[in-house]
Amino acid sequence: MYKKILFICCIFLLSGCTRISNDNQYIDLVNHCFVEKKITNDVALGYKYYIPRGVEKIHDYDYNQEFLVDNTSIYLYVDIVSYYYKKELQYKETGTEFYYEKFHYKKNTGYIKIDKLGDEYLLSMVYHYSKIEVYTNEKNLSKMVTLSSIILNSITYNDRVIEKVLEGNLGEFSEVTYEIKKPDGASSNFSQYLEEYVQKEEQQKKEDLPDE
């Protein structure tokens, strides 16, 4: 019965209803949204994705998007460079997270991480070279997990476009850093996301060189 309820929640979001029960089984919300058929309704530079009904896109930064729902900002960062070079996810659990779970779907690895910051929560979700961050309250936490799961699962890369972008502008490529609306004393920067994927290739090369 519980699984059926979660399944219905995801269906309701896709059809426009935003009523979601709040609980601690966030990974179940992720899993049930990921098994849904992938659909898209918007295009960005190098990928396409789905914006759930009720979610408004307010900024488009080519590789990154900012959405608004219930007066809450959802920030999406898509790392086409790491996708192109197939970098592996490097994040390791610290043990200080309020909630943390890894998940695997269709050969791709991701995680959901929630940090409690006073009365607010920072939701971070990473999957398939893309990341979503949301500052929200406890009441809307499950809803934001579901919306984030739907968006991340929908991302479909255009290899041909990405190859042309990187071949022509790789030296000019730079990430966008968002100023996320957050509680006082909290800090977050999307540039940290790159560190989760980038492998220490240059360091390894130096170690492999023979001594002079």
Image (cartoon, helix red, strand yellow):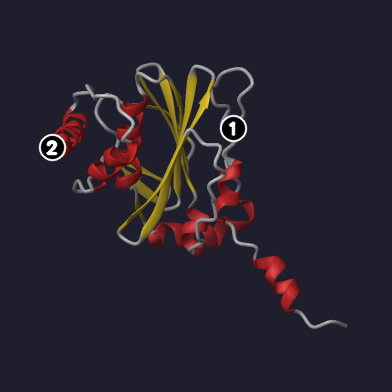
From the viewer's perspective, is the residue at label 2 or at label 1 nearer? Answer: 2
Is 2 above or below relative to 79?
above
Is 39 above or below relative to 10?
below
| Residue at image mark 2 | 4
Distance from Cα at disc 2 to Cα at disc 1: 35 Å
- CB under 8 Å between discs 2 and 1: no
Residue at x 37%, y 58% (from the top left corner): 108
| Residue at image mark 1 | 188
| Closer-to-camera residue (30/82) | 30
Crowd class of label 2 (few under 14; some 14 to 19; many from 20; radius 10 Å): few
Give coordinates of residue 113: x percent, y percent: 46, 39
Tag 2: residue type?
Answer: Lys
Q: Is residue 145 left or right of residue 10?
A: right
Work out whether residue 98 can be spotted.
yes
Sequence-wise first label, 2 or 1: 2
| Closer-to-camera residue (77/6) | 6
